Image (cartoon, helix red, strand yellow):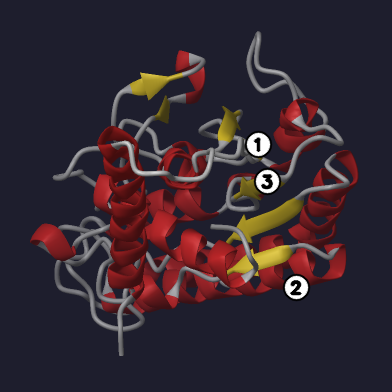
Amino acid sequence: MVSTAFRIKLRRAMAALAVLAGCCVTALGVGAPAAQAQTQLRYVALGDSYSAGPLDGPITGNPLCLQSSASYPYETAAYLGASFNDVSCSGADSSNVTSTSQYPGVSPQVGALSSSTQLVTLTDGGNDNNLFVSAVAECSVIDIADFLNIGSPCKDVYGNTFSNDVAADASTVEQTFATVKADAPNAQVYVLGYPDILPASGNCYPTMPLTSGDTSYLNGVEVDLNSMIEAAAAKAGVHYVSTYSQFVGHGACATGSNQWINPLLPTNGGISVHPNAAGEQQLAGILETSLANNGIS
């Protein structure tokens, strides 16, 4: 089976060859047809830090948002040759996408949308109720001294709290997606789910200071979160792009070039429990395949 990454690289190489061929034809004076002007796709990126790619590359835009030029939206915009506006912002929750200024000078993200917008991408939901990254941080504090890997201390403390928070956020996330769609009525909207961060079993203490029981517990919370986001996207009538399975074996417990998600202490740039630059490239490839399957390439 041909991998997603190979297909993306192949398409990019073919696009480059096409440009090179066109240049050569012109240089040789061969009677090529006049080039037809193409309108650039109008692309707006929204969402949280998984869209912004904080510290994965040179900072762009408002420094409070920690957007980087290594993020998956930047990668995808370059691949598409799109007219691009990135208003994603690290730490954003659903209210910051739709209605609330996150920082001074950082307006609600939907203000960047209009009837002329043709493509919108976003990740959203993980920061509502300060959810997933906070859950990992809180469990790491509880488990950090448990080097004997006994039980699931964090699960014992929090039980169903995190999953209940996910369920409680469902209507908010659905309304966020519906608002984005309404504010960009002529755009295709793509919501990316969160990539696999922790293994379903086992652990990698102290890289991620969690017992095996709590590693599995938090993995289950992320699965619940993605299921909620996928259902909300379906109800709002927008595209959902699953990224979870492609990152299995490449999360925070992986090593070297196989590690696409940073552990608690990043070793490949970026910030804790977020995609590094290699991870953002993988997200771009997954998104680009989904776009191509729907006629955008």
Q: Can you tell which quarter of the image residue 92 is in?
A: top right
Rendered image: mark on residue 23? none
Question: Could you say where residue 68 lies in the image, as x and y percent from the top left?
Answer: 38, 29
Q: Say if residue 88 shows up in the picture.
A: no
Point out the frontmost of discs 2 and 1. Answer: 1
Q: Can you tell which quarter of the image residue 260 is in?
A: bottom left
Determine crowd level at label 2: few under 14, some 14-19, many 20+ residues with C-alpha closer than 10 A.
Answer: some
Which one is earlier in the sequence, the residue at label 2 or at label 3? 3
Label 2 – label 3 distance at C-alpha: 18 Å
Q: Say if residue 111 shows up in the picture.
A: yes
Give the amino acid type for the residue marked by disc 1 in the picture.
Answer: Thr
Would you name the residue on which mark 3 appears? Answer: 120
Q: Foreground residue, 102 or 205?
A: 102
Point out the frontmost of discs 2 and 3. Answer: 3
Which one is earlier in the sequence, the residue at label 1 or at label 3? 1
Q: Foreground residue, 120 or 28?
A: 28
Give the amino acid type for the residue marked by disc 2 in the picture.
Answer: Ala
Query: Above or below — where is 82 with respect to 150?
Result: above
Determine crowd level at label 3: few under 14, some 14-19, many 20+ residues with C-alpha closer than 10 A.
Answer: many
Question: Could you say where residue 28 lies in the image, as x and y percent from the top left?
Answer: 26, 38
